[in-house]
Image (tube, helix red, strand yellow):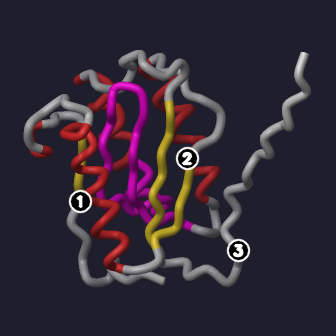
Amino acid sequence: MTNWPRRKSLGHCVPTWVDTNCDWFITIACAPRGLNQLAKPEVKEALTVAIEYYRQANQLEPRVWVAMPDHLHLIAKFDHRRGMATTITALKRHIAARQGVKWQRGFFDHRLRSTTEVEAKSMYVRMNPVRAGLVAHPENWPYRGERERTNRQEGNG
Protein backbone atom coordinates (compact mmCIF):
# COMPACT_ATOMS: atom_id res chain seq x y z
CA MET A 1 0.00 0.00 0.00
CA THR A 2 1.34 3.43 -0.94
CA ASN A 3 1.55 6.01 1.82
CA TRP A 4 0.25 9.09 0.04
CA PRO A 5 0.68 12.43 1.76
CA ARG A 6 -2.44 13.41 3.62
CA ARG A 7 -4.12 16.53 2.23
CA LYS A 8 -4.11 19.37 4.73
CA SER A 9 -7.41 20.90 5.69
CA LEU A 10 -7.55 24.58 4.84
CA GLY A 11 -9.02 26.92 7.40
CA HIS A 12 -11.60 29.47 6.41
CA CYS A 13 -10.59 32.12 8.91
CA VAL A 14 -10.31 35.56 7.40
CA PRO A 15 -7.09 37.32 8.43
CA THR A 16 -7.60 40.60 10.27
CA TRP A 17 -5.79 42.53 7.53
CA VAL A 18 -8.37 41.51 4.88
CA ASP A 19 -10.99 44.13 4.03
CA THR A 20 -14.20 43.02 5.73
CA ASN A 21 -16.25 44.40 2.84
CA CYS A 22 -14.84 42.11 0.12
CA ASP A 23 -16.74 39.52 -1.89
CA TRP A 24 -15.92 35.81 -1.75
CA PHE A 25 -16.35 33.12 -4.38
CA ILE A 26 -17.61 29.94 -2.70
CA THR A 27 -18.04 26.43 -4.14
CA ILE A 28 -19.84 23.78 -2.11
CA ALA A 29 -19.84 20.25 -3.57
CA CYS A 30 -22.28 17.43 -3.02
CA ALA A 31 -21.32 13.86 -2.16
CA PRO A 32 -21.10 11.95 -4.34
CA ARG A 33 -20.26 14.13 -7.33
CA GLY A 34 -22.17 13.35 -10.51
CA LEU A 35 -25.55 12.84 -8.81
CA ASN A 36 -28.21 15.52 -9.22
CA GLN A 37 -29.08 16.70 -5.73
CA LEU A 38 -29.42 20.45 -6.30
CA ALA A 39 -30.97 21.15 -9.73
CA LYS A 40 -34.52 20.52 -8.52
CA PRO A 41 -37.35 23.04 -7.98
CA GLU A 42 -37.81 22.17 -4.29
CA VAL A 43 -34.08 22.52 -3.57
CA LYS A 44 -33.96 25.84 -5.44
CA GLU A 45 -36.83 27.09 -3.28
CA ALA A 46 -35.08 25.92 -0.09
CA LEU A 47 -31.82 27.60 -1.18
CA THR A 48 -33.64 30.83 -2.02
CA VAL A 49 -35.36 30.89 1.38
CA ALA A 50 -32.18 29.99 3.28
CA ILE A 51 -29.99 32.53 1.49
CA GLU A 52 -32.61 35.22 2.12
CA TYR A 53 -32.82 34.22 5.79
CA TYR A 54 -29.04 34.57 6.22
CA ARG A 55 -29.14 37.87 4.30
CA GLN A 56 -31.82 39.29 6.59
CA ALA A 57 -29.83 38.07 9.60
CA ASN A 58 -26.87 40.10 8.22
CA GLN A 59 -24.70 36.99 7.99
CA LEU A 60 -24.17 37.19 4.23
CA GLU A 61 -24.87 39.56 1.37
CA PRO A 62 -25.35 37.46 -1.78
CA ARG A 63 -24.51 38.76 -5.23
CA VAL A 64 -25.16 35.69 -7.39
CA TRP A 65 -25.59 31.96 -6.83
CA VAL A 66 -26.07 28.99 -9.16
CA ALA A 67 -27.04 25.49 -8.12
CA MET A 68 -25.56 22.97 -10.52
CA PRO A 69 -26.66 19.33 -10.22
CA ASP A 70 -23.82 18.43 -7.84
CA HIS A 71 -22.37 21.71 -6.57
CA LEU A 72 -23.31 25.23 -5.59
CA HIS A 73 -21.48 28.42 -6.55
CA LEU A 74 -22.06 31.54 -4.47
CA ILE A 75 -20.55 35.01 -4.55
CA ALA A 76 -21.25 36.91 -1.37
CA LYS A 77 -19.95 39.13 1.38
CA PHE A 78 -19.94 37.63 4.88
CA ASP A 79 -20.24 38.96 8.42
CA HIS A 80 -16.65 38.52 9.56
CA ARG A 81 -17.60 38.65 13.24
CA ARG A 82 -19.71 35.50 12.82
CA GLY A 83 -17.34 33.92 10.32
CA MET A 84 -17.76 32.64 6.79
CA ALA A 85 -17.32 28.99 7.83
CA THR A 86 -20.05 29.29 10.47
CA THR A 87 -22.51 30.72 7.95
CA ILE A 88 -21.68 28.19 5.20
CA THR A 89 -21.89 25.30 7.67
CA ALA A 90 -25.30 26.53 8.85
CA LEU A 91 -26.51 26.89 5.25
CA LYS A 92 -25.34 23.36 4.38
CA ARG A 93 -26.94 21.93 7.52
CA HIS A 94 -30.22 23.73 6.74
CA ILE A 95 -30.42 22.38 3.18
CA ALA A 96 -29.34 18.89 4.24
CA ALA A 97 -32.04 18.72 6.92
CA ARG A 98 -34.84 20.02 4.70
CA GLN A 99 -33.91 18.50 1.32
CA GLY A 100 -31.73 15.50 2.16
CA VAL A 101 -28.76 16.92 0.24
CA LYS A 102 -25.50 15.23 1.14
CA TRP A 103 -22.53 17.60 1.07
CA GLN A 104 -18.81 16.95 0.92
CA ARG A 105 -16.92 18.13 3.96
CA GLY A 106 -15.85 21.74 3.84
CA PHE A 107 -16.03 24.12 0.90
CA PHE A 108 -13.75 26.12 -1.38
CA ASP A 109 -13.40 29.88 -0.90
CA HIS A 110 -11.52 32.54 -2.81
CA ARG A 111 -11.39 36.22 -1.90
CA LEU A 112 -12.23 38.51 -4.81
CA ARG A 113 -9.84 41.43 -4.68
CA SER A 114 -11.29 43.92 -7.14
CA THR A 115 -14.51 44.95 -8.82
CA THR A 116 -13.10 43.52 -12.07
CA GLU A 117 -12.49 40.16 -10.41
CA VAL A 118 -16.00 40.19 -8.87
CA GLU A 119 -17.57 40.84 -12.28
CA ALA A 120 -15.45 38.17 -14.01
CA LYS A 121 -16.22 35.54 -11.36
CA SER A 122 -19.92 36.49 -11.40
CA MET A 123 -19.97 35.87 -15.15
CA TYR A 124 -18.17 32.55 -14.59
CA VAL A 125 -20.88 31.52 -12.10
CA ARG A 126 -23.72 32.60 -14.41
CA MET A 127 -22.17 30.76 -17.38
CA ASN A 128 -21.57 27.49 -15.50
CA PRO A 129 -24.78 25.79 -16.76
CA VAL A 130 -23.98 26.91 -20.33
CA ARG A 131 -20.45 25.49 -20.19
CA ALA A 132 -21.90 22.24 -18.82
CA GLY A 133 -24.26 22.03 -21.81
CA LEU A 134 -27.39 22.24 -19.66
CA VAL A 135 -28.82 25.39 -21.30
CA ALA A 136 -27.97 27.63 -24.23
CA HIS A 137 -28.22 30.90 -22.26
CA PRO A 138 -27.54 31.52 -18.57
CA GLU A 139 -30.92 33.16 -17.99
CA ASN A 140 -32.60 29.87 -19.02
CA TRP A 141 -31.13 28.01 -16.02
CA PRO A 142 -33.86 28.04 -13.35
CA TYR A 143 -31.65 27.07 -10.39
CA ARG A 144 -30.02 30.42 -9.68
CA GLY A 145 -30.46 33.66 -7.84
CA GLU A 146 -29.09 37.14 -8.19
CA ARG A 147 -29.39 40.25 -6.12
CA GLU A 148 -28.60 43.80 -7.09
CA ARG A 149 -26.62 45.66 -4.47
CA THR A 150 -27.17 49.18 -3.28
CA ASN A 151 -24.28 51.64 -3.20
CA ARG A 152 -23.96 51.03 0.57
CA GLN A 153 -23.31 47.36 -0.11
CA GLU A 154 -20.81 47.94 -2.91
CA GLY A 155 -17.10 48.14 -2.45
CA ASN A 156 -14.29 45.66 -2.49
CA GLY A 157 -10.93 45.29 -0.87
Which is nearer the eye, 148 or 55? 148
Between the residue at mark 3 and the residue at mark 1, the CA separation in whole angstroms equals 27 Å
From the viewer's perspective, is residue 151 above or below residue 57?
below
Mark closer to the chain start, 2 or 1: 2
| Mark 1 crowdedness (10 Å alpha carbons): few <14, some 14-19, many ≥20 | few
> Looking at the image, which is closer to me, 118 or 142?
118
Q: Which residue is mark 3?
A: 15
Q: Marks 3/2: CA distance?
A: 18 Å
Instruction: Name the residue beneath numbered marker 2.
Output: 88
Please name whichever residue, 66 or 96, is drawn nearer the observer in this view of the structure: 66
Q: Which of the marked residues, 3 or 2, is nearer the chain's N terminus?
A: 3
Q: Position of residue 79 (x, y in %)?
A: 54, 66
What residue is shown at x 34% (from left), y 79% (from top)? Answer: 115
- Identify residue type, mark 3: Pro
Please tell me whether mark 3 or mark 1 is closer to you in this view: 3
- Asked whether the residues under the numbered discs 3 and 2 touch, taking CB atoms below 8 Å apart as contact, a structural biologist would say no
Q: Secondary structure at mark 1?
A: loop
SS at circle 2: helix
Name which residue type carries label 1: Arg
Q: Amino acid at mark 2?
A: Ile
Q: Is residue 31 above or below residue 17?
A: above
Q: Tell whether position 73 is magenta.
A: yes
Place of residue 27 in the rendered image (x, y in percent of width and height, measured from the top left): 48, 45
Which residue is denoted by mark 1 in the rendering? 147
What's the residue at 59%, 57% (across, down)? 84
- Which comes before the other along the chain, label 3 or label 1? 3
Left or right: residue 140 compared with residue 30: left
Of discs 3 and 2, which sits in the foreground? 3
